[in-house]
Image (spheres, helix red, strand yellow):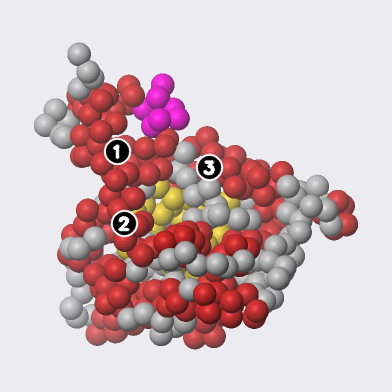
Amino acid sequence: MTTTVDTSAVTDDAALDPRPSTLRAARETPTSLWNDSADPRELSRAIAEFGAVGATCNPVIALTCIKSDPDTWVPRIRELAALHPTAGESELGWMAVEELSIGAAKLLEPAFAATGGRDGRLSMQTDPRFHRDRDALVAQAEYFSGLAENIIVKIPATKTGIEAMEEAVFRGVSINATVSFTVPQAVAVAEALERGLDRRAAALASDSGLPASYRPEKTEFGNVVTIMGGRFDDWLKTVVKRDHLMVDPGILEWAGVAALKKAHHIFVSRGFRSRILSAAFRNHMQWSELVGGDLVVSPPFQWIVDINAARVPVDNRIDVPVDPAIIQALRDAIPDFSRGYDVDGMTVDEFERFGATVTTLRQFLDADAQLDALVRDIIVPAA
């Protein structure tokens, strides 16, 4: 079974058009490019050279930024510690996350204005330690949303997180679901966002029951629903290794792409007022196979550079289905693929225990702890 896409040869169209592949896709199709980093050096290039109109910040990204630019961040964190003498390392680390986010949001203001708020968004992730606390997630989402007009808040797509998303969007927060890997998660989130938006409309019409933070003038939320396609692939590869399954390894690169394509088409057919976002890149198909869709692709900066260096062809492939033989082979070999691919593959109660969810939540919690440790080493250096 052939399961790879050959992009070794540059198409005639690409040879005639010297623009970067991602810039061409951003200019010629509805597909938006966001940069999966708030590092100002990377984001500035992604906007200017590659057509990026969005970005992301979270403890993982903040940790990477601080490590990669110590000349900027080590003295800044010491300044923050001096300004806030009672703040602990966790509080100071989140101050760094806020500063990165506000700076990135500023860089994205032109795109925000040009698209009426649909793009130009900076995704800011809620504290992973709040993943079991609906009210804490809502409160932090409201706070983050107030840091800049174009901030969109990431909340995990678990049962608790989905409840928080519905309430947050009712209160005027723009939402980006995270810790989300599957079609049933994406659909459950989209349905919750619809309920939240409908509650807003009803509250506005009746002018009653409005929360203090309610902003009736807000008309474009720019809500997106992430599917971390590469992490879906990662989990299936873990299952294959764990259970000693014999499969064509090439099919494992298609699972996330298949879930992304299917979810996008469901969103369009059901008229959801949110878009799919492709994240957690493991192969270029998580961009190239989605080009043409009214959705968002959010690769890390180096992936953007590599896609353009390889001059991956810009073809409208969103409506080209994944080979049915690959889908069937994944179904036959790995039950967790069907759980993640079928709309009714999991109930909302099952999301929190899905393998990719557990793995990713633990990684986010660990990154938060690593950020704490890094700040601790800066403000309390070893003797």
Instruction: Characterize the local packing of mark 2: few (<14), some (14-19) or many (20 or more) Cα atoms within 10 angstroms.
Output: some
Cβ atoms at labels 1 and 3 below 8 Å apart: no
Residue 165 visible, this orientation? no
The amino acid sitting under disc 1 is: Gln
Q: Earlier in the sequence, mark 2 or mark 1?
A: 2
Choose between 31 and 150: the one closer to the eye.
31
Q: Is 53 positioned to the left or the right of 219 in the image?
A: right
Callout 3, which amino acid?
Leu
Tag 1 residue: 370
Which of the two discs, 2 and 3, sits closer to the camera?
2
User: Which is the main secondary structure of the residues drawn in magenta?
Assistant: helix
Of circles 1 and 3, the one toward us is 1
Residue at label 2? 361
Determine if the magenta segment contains residue 295.
no
Magenta region includes residue 72: yes
The residue furthest left is 86
Q: Position of residue 144 (x, y in %)?
A: 29, 53
Asked if the residue at tag 3 contacts the one at tag 2, i.e. Cβ–Cβ closer than 8 Å, the answer is no
For the residues labelled 2 and 1, say whether their Cβ atoms are less than 8 Å apart.
no
The residue drawn where x is 19% and y is 70% is 211
Q: Which residue is mark 3?
A: 43
x and y percentages locating residue 121 in the rendered image: 46, 55
Secondary structure under the numbered disc 3 in the rendered image:
helix
Residue 281 image offset from top left, x and y in percent = 54, 55
| Badge 2 amino acid | Leu
Give the CA distance from mark 1 to mark 3.
Answer: 23 Å
Magenta-highlighted residues: 66-73
Q: CA distance from mark 2 to mark 1?
A: 14 Å
